[in-house]
Image (tube, rainbow, N blue to C red):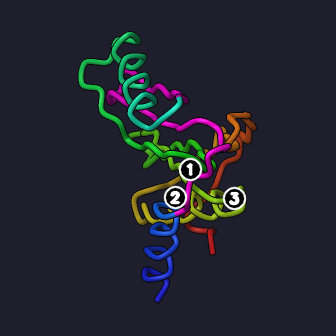
Amino acid sequence: MKKLALAFASFLFLVVPVKADEPPAFAAAISPEQAFEMCRAADVGAAAACALKKCKDAGGDECVVITACDSGWAGLLGISTGEIHFTDAICGAPSEPALMTSLSAYCKGHLPYAKECYLSSIWSPDGKEKQLEKTLDPRKIK
């Protein structure tokens, strides 16, 4: 039942209507162990192209877009297994609480391998960054 609820919540992020007056799109691109870059732009295509360019300009050899959304809240999550660490991003959440729930669920979803998750920053739909610098123990997330 929990998996179904999480899948439904994730689906909602994809179907939230975009209002004409909403701020720019968000995209993040990564090249494993080399670069992680984000961009906001007028539309998803431009945001993704910008993030890929910034990733390549930062020295990334194999940059790929890991998330892109027309609008909504976005956040970064670092995940550590004890041996490796990687960064991921989620975007398109309809509210800050929905984003925080999604980031926590994503962290917990990496059990039993994840030892720690690090919430570094979130962005409101208008692009304002809020630094969290919060560590989560995936074993203690309800």
Q: Residues within 10 Å of mark 3 (few under 14, many from 20)?
A: some
Say whether residue 93 is left or right of residue 59: right
The span picked out in magenta is 16-41
Q: Quadrant of the C terminus?
A: bottom right
Q: Residues within 10 Å of mark 2 (few under 14, many from 20)?
A: many
For label 3, the residue is: 95
Disc 3 versus disc 2: nearer the observer? 3
The residue lying at 55 percent from left, 59 percent from top is: 17
Q: Position of residue 139 (x, y in %)?
A: 56, 67
Is residue 79 located in the magenta-colored stretch of the structure? no
Q: Position of residue 34 (x, y in %)?
A: 36, 21
- SS for tag 1? strand
Distance CA(mark 3)–CA(mark 2): 18 Å
Q: Residues within 10 Å of mark 1 (few under 14, many from 20)?
A: many
Q: Quadrant of residue 133?
A: top right
Q: Residue furthest front?
A: 20
Sequence-wise, which precedes: disc 1 or disc 3? 3
Amino acid marked by disc 2: Cys
For label 2, the residue is: 107
The residue lying at 38 percent from left, 33 percent from top is: 45
For label 1, the residue is: 117
Say whether residue 86 is left or right of residue 64: right
Marks 1,2: beta carbons within 8 A: yes
Mark carried by residue 30? none
62 to 57, vertically: above or below: below
Distance CA(mark 1)–CA(mark 3): 21 Å
67 to 98, vertically: above or below: above
Amino acid marked by disc 1: Cys
* Front in this rendered view, residue 34 or 25: 25
Q: Residue furthest left?
A: 62
The residue lying at 50 percent from left, 45 percent from top is: 70
